[in-house]
Image: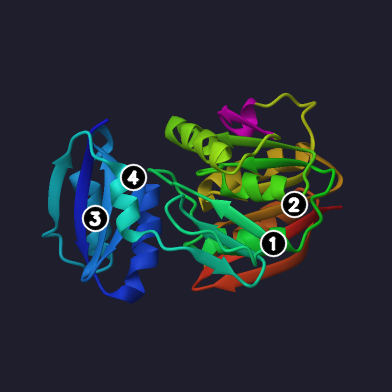
Amino acid sequence: MDFVEIDIFCKKDLKEIITAELCHLGYESFLDTSDGFRAYQPVKNHDPAMLNLLLERYTLSTDFKCKKLTDRNWNEIWEQSFEPIEIGDQCRIRASFHLQKHRFPYEIIIDPKMSFGTGHHESTRQMIQFQLGLDHRGKSILDAGCGTGILSILAEQKGAKQVLALDTDPQAVSNTVENMVLNCAKKIKVKEGSIGDLSINSTFDLILANINRNVLLVEIDLYRQHLNKSGLLVLSGFYTYDSVCIVKKCTDNAFKIKNQTEENQWACLLLETI
């Protein structure tokens, strides 16, 4: 597949919010540069007019650099920028080309290709922090919007009985399978699709959904339908100022908040069925 590479010039404090906005426009991968970052998107989805509107909204220059990439070595790109992430003293996320550190109870190997979810983003880190505090032993887990499969892999490492990883992006599905192999994961089943494609009889003890505000608002009622009694739901991928509408949708669907965190304007919620 051919991709478009866009050079965005902005200050460091704007990188996260612009990156999130670009995710909503279908950009699939990002690399930091000295004066901003690069964004990658399939050529077929590239819309210069929408990109211009976004940059103008943040008073950024619309004189961006754009070039077409054909048959790019994405592994080489990620190796240039992907550094290991350590979450407290419990979890370390690294690529296959990094050395192992044995002092972490959980070490996850992720070669992300073009999929979202390396632990570098605030939403992923907060999801993992909540997971580290939850008992997964013998539980059934749904990873809705699995990206690289990072949350599914951690769920298996923490003793989950079975894990279903869903994503609507076929590249994310194939990348999750590749990362399962790297981590010797045996209990994860990967499917292309969304929670709306599941049978009503498919229920789980824990649902993990690190997606975005709009998708979450559509799917929260489905999360409730597919959770067992006293089931838990962990949500992220939205800004703190969007928490009000997310929480309202959750309470309308018989969820109560057990905990919530915030990091650099990104929110994460831990909820329980009532």
- Left/right placement of residue 148 relative to residue 126 reads left
Quadrant hosting residue 107? bottom right
Name the amino acid, label 3. Leu
Amino acid carrying mark 4 in the image: Asn
What residue sits right under mark 2 in the picture? 158
- Tag 2: Cα neighbours inside 10 Å, few (<14), some, or many (≥20)? some
Q: Is residue 192 magenta?
A: yes
C-alpha distance separating marks 3 and 2:
44 Å
Please tell me whether residue 256 is drawn above or below residue 25 in the rendered image.
below
Q: CA distance from mark 4 to mark 2?
A: 28 Å
Task: Estimate the x, y position of residue 239 in percent, counting from the top left.
Answer: 51, 64
Is residue 131 in sight in this rendering?
A: yes
Question: Is disc 4 placed on a helix, strand or loop?
Answer: helix
Q: Which mark is residue 21?
A: none
Residue 239 against residue 191 in the figure, above or below? below
Quarter holding the N terminus is: top left
Q: Along the line of sight, which residue is nearer the eye, 224 or 95? A: 95
33 part of magenta stretch: no
Q: SS of the residue at dot 3?
A: helix
* Pointer 1 residue: 105
Foreground pick, 251 / 109: 109
Instruction: Give whichever of discs 2 and 1 has the lower sequence position.
Output: 1
Identify the magenta region: 188-197
Judging by the rendered image, the residue that carries numbered circle 3 is 53
User: Circle 2 sits in a helix, a strand or a loop, which is it?
Assistant: loop
Point out the tag, 4 or 3, that comes first from the N-terminus. 3
Tell me which corner region of the image, top left, top right, bottom left or bottom right, holds residue 86. Answer: bottom right
Which comes before the other along the chain, label 4 or label 1?
4
Residue, x 68% and y 34% (percent of image)? 186
Question: Label 4, on which residue?
Answer: 75
Contact flag, marks 4 and 3 (Cβ < 8 Å)? no
